[in-house]
Image (cartoon, grey):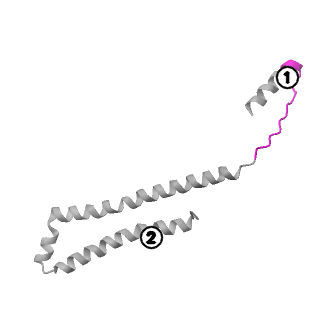
Amino acid sequence: MFPQYMYQAILRVATDDPTFNFDVTSTPYPIYQAFKDIEEAASAYDFVFMTAIALALIPCVMVQFILQERELNLKHQQLLSGMSLAGYWASNIIFDVFMAYIPIGLIIMLTFVFNKHY
């Protein structure tokens, strides 16, 4: 629209008419299906990339608990308190599975809520 205002100002000076109006009608070109497909594919790649980063951070949380457990000797304390080794490992695997399923479930739910079906 800037050139339209410049042409209008030039024509006002050239015609010596301060009320001169220069109207412009603009008709945008239609968006081609190929461009829509490219935009949708780029959106899908962004979604997959961000989801992959989110899922890659889940093991980081699990490793944090393993390191804390190793640092504080929690396994040794629990075994001395009478916990069985099978119960210790079963509780750890159950906790790790739930820690992974919560974000995965949230990602799946939010995918459907925000209608991001790719």
Q: Which label number is shown at residue 46?
A: none
| Magenta stretch holds residue 16 | yes
Percent coordinates x, y for residue 100 in the rendering: 36, 68
| N-term-proximal mark, 1 vs 2 | 1
Q: Are marks 1 and 2 in contact (CB under 8 Å)?
A: no
Q: Tell me the quadrant of the picture where the C terminus can be found.
A: bottom right
Label 2 sits on residue? 105
Q: Secondary structure at mark 1?
A: helix
Above or below — where is 27 with respect to 11?
below
How many callouts does the rendering have?
A: 2
Segment tinted magenta in the rendering: 13-29
What residue is shown at x 82% (from left), y 27% (from top)?
Answer: 8
What main secondary structure does the magenta stretch of the protein show?
Answer: loop
Q: Position of residue 49 (x, y in %)?
A: 46, 55
Q: In the displayed structure, does residue 117 sit left or right of residue 82?
A: right
Q: Residue at 51% of width from left, 53% of height from top? A: 46
Instruction: Provide residue 111's location: percent of width, then percent of height.
Output: 53, 65
- Say if the magenta span includes residue 21: yes
Query: What is the secondary structure assignment of the residue under circle 2?
Result: helix
Q: Give the alpha-carbon distance from disc 1 to disc 2, as whole Å.
A: 65 Å
Between residues 86 and 70, which one lies in front from this camera angle? 86
- Going by the numbered disc 1, the residue's amino acid type is Arg
Is residue 54 left or right of 42 when viewed as pictured?
left
Which one is closest to the eye, mark 1 or mark 2?
A: 2
Q: Residue under circle 1?
A: 12
Crowding at dot 1, Cα within 10 Å, few <14 / some 14-19 / many 20+, comes out as some
Question: Which amino acid, by three-letter code, is at mark 2?
Answer: Gly
Left or right for 102, reference 66 = right
Position in image of residue 68 (x %, y %): 21, 62
